[in-house]
Image (tube, grey):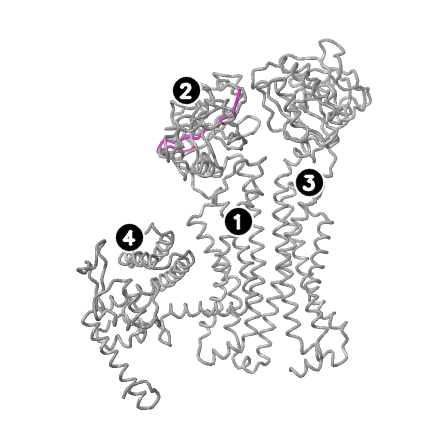
Amino acid sequence: MDDTIEARLPLSPVDFYILLVLTNSPLHGYAIMKAVERESEGRVVLQLGSLYRVISRLKDNQLIESQPSAVPGSGPGKPKRYYEISQLGRETLQAESARLVELAELLRGRKLHKGVPS
Amino acid sequence: MNGSRLPSSKLVRWALCLYPRKFRDIYADEMMEVYDELCLKTPRRACSRAILAARTILNLLKCSFLERMPGPAVGPPRHSNSRSQQEDGSTLMDSIWQDIRFAFRMLRRSPLFTAVSIFTLAVGIGATTASFHLIQSYFLSPTLRGPGGELVRVYTATPTGSAFSPFSFPAFEDLRERAQVFSQVAAHRRVSSTINMGGTEEPVSVELVTGDYFSLFGVGAERGRLLWPEDNVSQGAHPVLVISHSFWRAALGRDLDVVGRTLDLSGTSFTIVGVAPARFPGSHSGFATDLWVPVMMHNQARPTGSDLRSRGWGWLTATASVKPETTMHQVQADLDRIGAQLNRDYPGHFENRSFVAYPASPLPDELREGVWLIVMALTAVVVLVLLVGCANIASVLMGRVVARRREIAVRMSLGSGRLRLMRLWVCEALTLSFSGGLLGLVVAVAMHSSLLSMISDPNLMPGVSQDFNWGGVVLGFTLVASVLTGCLFGLVPSLQAGRVNVAAALKDAVGSATASARGSRLRAAFVVTQVTVSVVLLVGAGLLLRTLGEADAFDPGFETANLLLAPVNLGAIGYDPSQSQRFAMQLMERLSAHDDVRNASYAMSVPLSGGRDSSGFVIPGHEPSPEKPWVIISTNVVGPDYFATIGIPIVRGRGFGGRIAAAGMGEVVINETMAARYWSGEDPLGQQFRSADANPRTLQVVGVARDIKYYSLGEPPRPFVYARADQAPAPFFTIHVRTENDAVAFLPALKAEVAALEGSLQVRGAMTFEQLRRVPLLPQKMMAQLTVVFSSMALLLTAVGIYGVVAQSVAGRVQEIGVRMALGGGRGDIVRMILTRVCLLVGVGLILGLTGAAWAFQLIEGFLFGISATDPLTYAMVALLLIVVALAASLNPLRRATGVDPVTALRYQ
């Protein structure tokens, strides 16, 4: 597999949102599902199977990592598995953001998109 | 979090099983936690949670499918160099998923076709699954094994050819002690009995078993304990029983304190000592057992008065566990040895019988052959109906290929590959067949019980297990049936789609017309096949219905209406023959006193009931050889007034009534055939002959009775001897009562009279002659029901097929019709043109079908009565029916064809 960041681009909207919600703090599966829904303002609603399909792929792609133990202060009960963004994931997200901004610039230059700030 | 808290969690857990093991190991538990959390955060309304469960499961099905398919394991799903990706960058799996979604969209667009197709497939696949379930549970299940090794069933074979006869309890004990090849042997007998549940009598299926029965099968108790050898020591001393899991659930509401409760079984109070596990059905998994009772309690569980220690009372069969490394050959050799010893030790009792062993199967061996025949016939019928349904769907799909050839051509010209296009059609077909298969499972469960009720008449197979066992094999069969069916009707349209001529289709010109002509020839072939199959099924149904009709209308030679028959066994309650004779005479007197009774009598056997007796007689002048001077003649022992009661006319002399004429001499009545055969040209009255037994008796003919049918409706005339019951008394007989009105209504009065004379005598199995005469025809009745149902279905589907082909042909020839009409052709010409085609199709199908039926039903000619397998009336009726149905199906398209406006048709061109 190609290890470069470019090989991982572009990110699908779901991949993008998952990486995005993990930039603040590690989250467990249910929290990722809800955070993505909140962050995308309800445009991306993940089902259980799809969520874990993407998580599995992002992990295999080394964009996220899992923590086997509980995060301190996460409450009592069985330890949950938390996922956090990896360094490679952070860089890929940045590259994707840059790519999207570049595209937006391009559209703005052609006056095709009014919403992009100059 | 405990997943079992939520009912839908189990379903989600099952859906997760579809994922690859590696994926499951890492994520399954976590996914379950997320799901439980989702559920808990969803409002507690049943429908919100149900929607969540349904969406999650569907999503899991899709994702597990994608996860299992080859694709880029890592990397973003797009813009990779993986070979499994398509030109548009999506993976193969994504594109198949796309095809499936497209198929769903297309099917949604034609809801009527989709609904009818799915319904047809559901019925076809469901019926096939239901019949496969029967085959699987009765015939494909592996030989039963116990903890001690392979299990075999042991019966006795009699010299007269019965291979599955039961044996007595002492013979079983001898078998258990002497057998060297078995590690364990248990005897059992299934009987029907009744329990008193809150004042009402409920029928139950009881197995009387010996103490080592449960350890032989290696089952442990669900609650309490099972039966032990200590429960089987002395007769009448162990009122304990074990209940089945389903009986515990259904009749006792899973009462947790069931152990120690009592049940009133046939008037005796039994204590429940335990519950058998759910997976244990009893000796035969094809039958359901409610209660297991020690054999020592047989007289309490089903009062017969018989003595368990009697060597003459054969009633048990055995299941045995074969020692390891022992072959069936060695088993049989050992059984032969024991049989020979018993014949030597108890010459009068074992009657030259021998023990025989068969690998233990779920059905009692004596029923296997008959059930196999019925189940196979059923399978053949349902598969044929499924084929007829498939032909219709294929035909419609082909019509859709023609209708969508422009769309196909556009896709091709935009670069879509032929294979991809063909895949679209296969996907559509498979989507239909899987939907049909899924619904078919529901149909299979629903059909299972009705099929069982059809094939398991209580008179043939009482207590058949009604459970539908969902198992991998049955589900796998449905899956395979769905795939095969989908391929069957999807392949031709998909090949046709792959052959669309792009240029011609885009111009909507000649090339497409050729393709359409090829398609219409294929569809015509489908209709011919459908007609053929329908004809075969209809002829089968017709022949069976005619058989039933002939049998009902057939005169057996005596009056059949209002004749009540009730067997009684006085020997079971200790009567000797002369006491029984006195009892019978008193009973007849009491019965005759009723206003509703025209005549009452009794006899050893009932004509056409399956019971046969025969004896050897030495008839002067008719000795076959000096060494063997006797001839074997069928007999019955009958009481006074018998001939008047049953309605057999005495053509000469007299019947039995009043006193015996000559002391010491037996009086007999013979039938006309016997008189003609042995005393042709002489007066049979007063002729004497003697019985050929150990104590020969001289018998004198006092009367000649008209011939009747004795054993079967199709039998040739046979000589017959009626002996007087008071000269050959027996402790068991069947009471015959001819009533003025409904015979069934007299049964309570009959029971009351019997009880007034002897309180402990049970009247069981009483029925009218009309009911009794139907028993031998039950297989025909079942098959008639099945073939009528399924042949009607096939006929309906064929009508739809004919309609489709004619409508398609009219639609394709609108312009031709327009031109013909514009050139002066009349409506008659158009009708003739279309009808010629219909007649051709139906005609070819009829010829093939009638020939096929004539060949196929030769094989079951023995199953028919009163008609031959090539009964012209049935064949003519079927042909007529098919023609009428074909014309009716063509009526609407014909009306459309004759209504074509030439101007519009030509402008359209």
Proximity of marks 1 and 2: CB atoms separated by less than 8 Å = no
Parent chain of label 1: B
Residue under label 1: B446
Q: CA distance from mark 3 to mark 4?
A: 68 Å
Residue under label 2: B233
Which quarter of the picture shows residue B642? top right
Callout 1, which amino acid? Ala
Q: Mark 3: give few (<14), some (14-19) or many (20+) Cα within 10 Å.
A: many
Nearer the N terminus, badge 2 or badge 3?
2
Kind of element beneath mark 2: loop
Q: CA distance from mark 3 to mark 1?
A: 32 Å
Proximity of marks 2 and 4: CB atoms separated by less than 8 Å = no
Nearer the N terminus, badge 2 or badge 4?
4
Which quarter of the picture shows residue B90? bottom left
Q: Residue furthest left?
A: A72
Parent chain of label 2: B
Parent chain of label 4: B
Placement of B377 over or under B339, stated as above or below: below
Q: Residue furthest bottom?
A: A110
Q: Nearer the viewer, residue A38 or B403?
A: A38
Which contiguous range is marked in magenta?
B312-328
Proximity of marks 1 and 4: CB atoms separated by less than 8 Å = no
Residue depicted at x 75% and y 31%: B557
Q: Nearer the viewer, residue A37 or B848?
A: A37
Mark 3 vs mark 1, foreground winner is 1
Residue B321 in the magenta stretch? The answer is yes
Q: Mark 1: give few (<14), some (14-19) or many (20+) Cα within 10 Å.
A: some
Nearer the N terminus, badge 1 or badge 2?
2
Residue under label 3: B865
Q: Are marks 2 and 3 on the same chain?
A: yes
Q: Are marks 1 and 4 on the same chain?
A: yes
